[in-house]
Image (cartoon, rainbow, N blue to C red):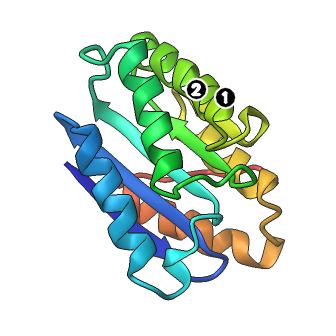
Amino acid sequence: MISHDFLEVPGIRYWHLSGDVDLDETIAAFLAVRDGGGSASDMNRPVLFDMRDVDMAPFTGADMRRYAERLKARGLDVPGGVAAYVVSNDTNFGMMRMSATYFELSGVRKQENTLVTLDIHEAADWIIHRAGISPSDQAAVRQFLDRQHGGQVRIST
């Protein structure tokens, strides 16, 4: 399952993935948001992928390589976009780091603009600082991520 939310100001997008994830389903969801128009359709906006409820073990490196190529072919490449992936275990961490390499090799996203972490607090902090979110908008980002994740996200300044 995949869901999306968007904070208009300063333009943070949040994707929550859970259960059995189908890679085709994720591409369809990305395309639906992109093609929906408005500010949320700008795929260059900073993004946090909350993948703590997903098991990446069924996927192989070849699956992720093909996935990166399909993202690029569908016009979902955002080399300058900033993305943080929050995962729940070392297996998922390794799979997403490998995916980040394939994303860079295929021209989808530069590794320097990608964070993979086990800690949502680290991801939120990194997104805020990497995307250059102004201090006046940081409280709104904290509240948005608190609502998404159901807990308190503390972001150091």
Q: Residue at x 63, y 82 (%)?
A: 9
Amino acid type of the residue that numbered disc 2 sits on in the rendered structure: Tyr
Q: Is residue 40 left or right of residue 109?
A: left
**The residue under label 1 is which amino acid type?**
Leu
The percent position of residue 13, horizontal first and vertical second, equals: 51, 65
Residue 122 position in % (x across, y down) = 64, 38
Drawn side of residue 130 relative to residue 46, left or right: right
Quarter of the image that includes the C terminus: bottom right
Q: Which residue in the protein does label 2 denote?
A: 102
How many discs mark residues in the rendered view? 2
Depicted 54 relative to depicted 142: above or below? above
Left or right of 53 on screen, residue 102: right
Dot 2: what SS? Answer: helix
* Residue found at the far bottom of this picture: 38
The answer to whether residue 128 is left or right of residue 66 is right
Q: Are marks 1 and 2 in contact (CB under 8 Å)?
A: yes
Q: Residue 62 or 149: which is nearer the viewer?
A: 62
| Tag shown at residue 105 | 1
Identity of the residue furthest to the front in this view: 73
Residue 95 picture location, percent across and down: 46, 18
Q: Residue 69's spot in the image, x, y percent?
A: 49, 36
Report the Cα–Cα distance between label 1 and label 2.
5 Å
Counting other residues with Cα less than 10 Å from the Cα at mark 1, is it few (<14), some (14-19), or many (20 or more)? Answer: some
> Which secondary structure, mark 1?
helix
Residue at image position (54%, 32%) is 119
Answer above or below: position of 113 versus 135.
above
